[in-house]
């Protein structure tokens, strides 16, 4: 029986951190079933990927699982050169999510992240919609161009698989896909006890109602009027308030009707036919 190499490819804002935290929480349980899971960091993606697979060539793990939101954003040729040195059946798992959910989530993440974004959501959205319609054959935008992402990993020699994002059932769906590919019982993944997210964790979401305050905090920080540590404390306060608002108004929409329609139209133009066929 051939070994199996599985790449969890995100993309961004599709629950990758939750999946990676679950890998870490039940690493021993996965190892006992023959699955060796690794989180591959963006900054050293190709180097770390090569190092991990070099080490794994000496182990007997039947399944090696690598996770990164950025596998679809690097050259397929570069990935394939590394994969070709690791004899195994290759699979890539993607999670799809509607653009009307991805774009607000990505914008709000950038507000509390290292990019210290200060532009408005409308400016961000206009830029993303323009990028995702790029006819030049590139990835398009930062996130969800499903046909291009799929083609890139197929070019790297992987059989591709897609699951749909749902906050409540994501781990169960991912575990089911792993079971389908490997025929290994991985229910432990769905039962993983992950520590509650704190601080500026990617698993904590800022509410759009607090976006203006976060932009002001970033602007003061960029001008040297607010120290990095104080910026972090204020953003954590905004996240605490966001958690409270989410408990009171859990279904509050973060997009206007017009912006929602624009995102849905782009989804129809780029992703709908492809995702309906997977």
Image (spheres, helix red, strand yellow):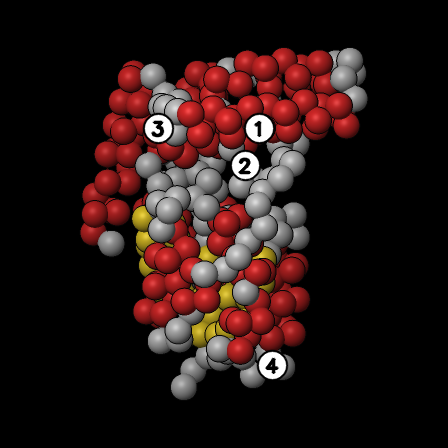
> Which residue is located at x 31 percent, y 23 percent?
260
Q: Position of residue 208 (x, y in %)?
A: 47, 21
Residue 28 at least partly seen: yes
Name the front one of labels 4 and 1.
1
227 sits to left or right of 76: right
Q: CA distance from mark 3 to mark 4?
A: 47 Å
Sequence order check, earlier mark of 1 and 2: 2
Q: Residues within 10 Å of mark 2 (few under 14, many from 20)?
A: some
Which mark, by number, is residue 239?
1
Closer to us: mark 3 or mark 4?
3
Q: Please report whichever mark, 3 or 4, sits nearer to the chain's N-terminal start.
A: 4
Tell me the element at label 4: loop
| SS for callout 2 | loop
Which residue is found at the position 56% from the left and 83% from the top? 60
Residue sitting at 25 percent across and 27 percent down?
Answer: 265
In which quadrant of the rendered view does residue 158 lie?
bottom left
Q: Which mark is residue 204?
A: 2
- What label sits on residue 59 in the rendered view? 4
Q: Which residue is mark 3?
A: 251
In primary-sequence order, the first of circles 2 and 4 is 4
Relative to the observer, which residue lies in front, 24 or 115? 24
Residue 67 at least partly seen: no
The reply to whether discs 1 and 2 touch (Cβ–Cβ < 8 Å) is yes
**Local crowd size for mark 3, using a 10 Å CA cut-off: few (<14), some (14–19), many (≥20):** few
- Residue neighbourhood size for the residue with mark 4, other residues' Cα within 10 Å, grouped as few (<14), some (14–19), many (≥20): few
Q: Is residue 270 above or below residue 31?
A: above
Q: Earlier in the sequence, mark 3 or mark 2?
A: 2
Residue 64 spot, x, y in % from top left = 52, 71
From the top left corner, tell me how far across and down residue 80 is, in percent.
50, 63
Q: Label 1's element?
A: helix
């Amino acid at each position: 029986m051939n070994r199996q190499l599985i790449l969890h490819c995100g993309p961004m804002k599709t629950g990758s951190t939750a999946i990676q935290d679950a890998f870490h929480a039940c690493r021993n349980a996965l190892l006992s079933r023959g699955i060796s899971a690794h989180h591959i960091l963006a900054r050293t993606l190709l180097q770390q990927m090569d190092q991990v697979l070099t080490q794994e060539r000496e182990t007997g793990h039947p399944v090696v699982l690598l996770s990164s939101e950025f596998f679809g954003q690097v050259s397929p040729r570069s990935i394939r050169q590394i994969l070709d040195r690791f004899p195994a059946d290759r699979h890539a798992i993607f999670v799809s999510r509607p653009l009307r959910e991805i774009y607000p989530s990505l914008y709000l993440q950038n507000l509390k992240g290292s990019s210290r974004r200060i532009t408005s959501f409308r400016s961000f959205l206009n830029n993303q919609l323009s990028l995702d319609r790029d006819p030049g054959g590139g990835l398009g935008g930062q996130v969800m161009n499903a046909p291009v992402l799929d083609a890139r990993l197929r070019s790297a020699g992987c059989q591709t698989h897609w699951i749909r994002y749902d906050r409540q059932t994501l781990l169960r769906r991912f575990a089911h896909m792993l079971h389908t590919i490997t025929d290994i019982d991985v229910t432990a993944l769905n039962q993983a006890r992950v520590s509650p997210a704190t601080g500026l964790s990617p698993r904590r979401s800022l509410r759009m109602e607090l976006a203006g305050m976060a932009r002001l905090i970033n602007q003061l920080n960029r001008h040297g009027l607010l120290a990095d540590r104080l910026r972090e404390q204020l953003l954590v306060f905004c996240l605490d308030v966001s958690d409270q608002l989410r408990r009171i108004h859990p279904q509050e929409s973060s997009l206007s009707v017009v912006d929602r329609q624009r995102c849905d139209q782009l989804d129809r133009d780029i992703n709908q036919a492809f995702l309906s066929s997977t």
